[in-house]
Amino acid sequence: MQDPRVDVSALSFPATLNTPRLRLVALGPEFLDDVMRGLADAETLRLTGTTATFTRDAVAAHLAAVGARDDRADWAILDAGTGDYLGEIVLNELDDENAAMNFRIALLPGRPGRGYGTEATTAVLDHAFATIGLHRVSLDVFSFNPRAVRSYEKAGFRHEGRQRHTLFWDGEWADSLLMAVLSTDERPTSESRTP
């Protein structure tokens, strides 16, 4: 078998990805207000297990630098019709030797159940396998987020395990569910799925 090769040039300033209802564009400073809105939302913080606080200056510095990095790809998820910011989606934690990356997504509240997360995830997986050259994309999701689990399953992620009591939130322990998808797994693609 040939050694896995990752095209890290496809990570820096990632390409715009288009789906029937969405446009995924490189996340940058122009989305500062939108990102800050997500970081101020209590439910978004709970679903992502985010306990840190972020200053506007720190987030602005991150957004100014993230596009040029060759170890991750960050996109803003936009409504293709209106241009409204819906959230962000990220491939990070590059393991170049093993052609693997971590996946995460955070949608702004108020639009659940419309399939935007699954649609955006499918587009990023298509790009991850066909363009970047990844073999494995993995994630962990908290057990109290069944909506996200269903979305990941629809996009092709498979369950790999459970880590017990990884997050202490509001006086209770939550488990992390480990999921991954391989380039060789059968899964829907952007061309094959309808919203």
Image (tube, helix red, strand yellow):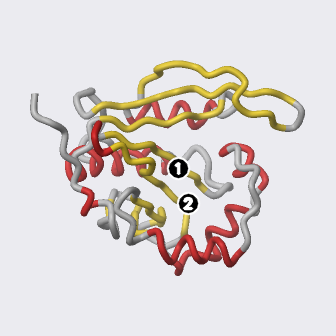
Asked which secondary structure carries label 2, the reply is: strand
The residue lying at 22 percent from left, 46 percent from top is 133
The residue lying at 55 percent from left, 31 percent from top is 149
Position of the N terminus, as image quadrant, is top left
The CA span between labels 1 and 2 is 8 Å
Residue 62 spot, x, y in % from top left: 56, 70
Residue situated in front as seen by the camera: 174 or 58: 58
Q: Which residue is mark 2?
A: 87
Estimate how packed mark 1 is, as few (under 14), some (14 to 19) or many (20 or more) residues with alpha carbons within 10 Å: some
**Residue farthest toward the left in the current orientation of the protein:** 1
Q: Label 2 amino acid?
A: Gly
Residue 35 spot, x, y in % from top left: 62, 68
Residue situated in front as seen by the camera: 111 or 160: 160
Q: Which residue is mark 1?
A: 105
Above or below 47: residue 61? below
The residue lying at 70 percent from left, 43 percent from top is 49
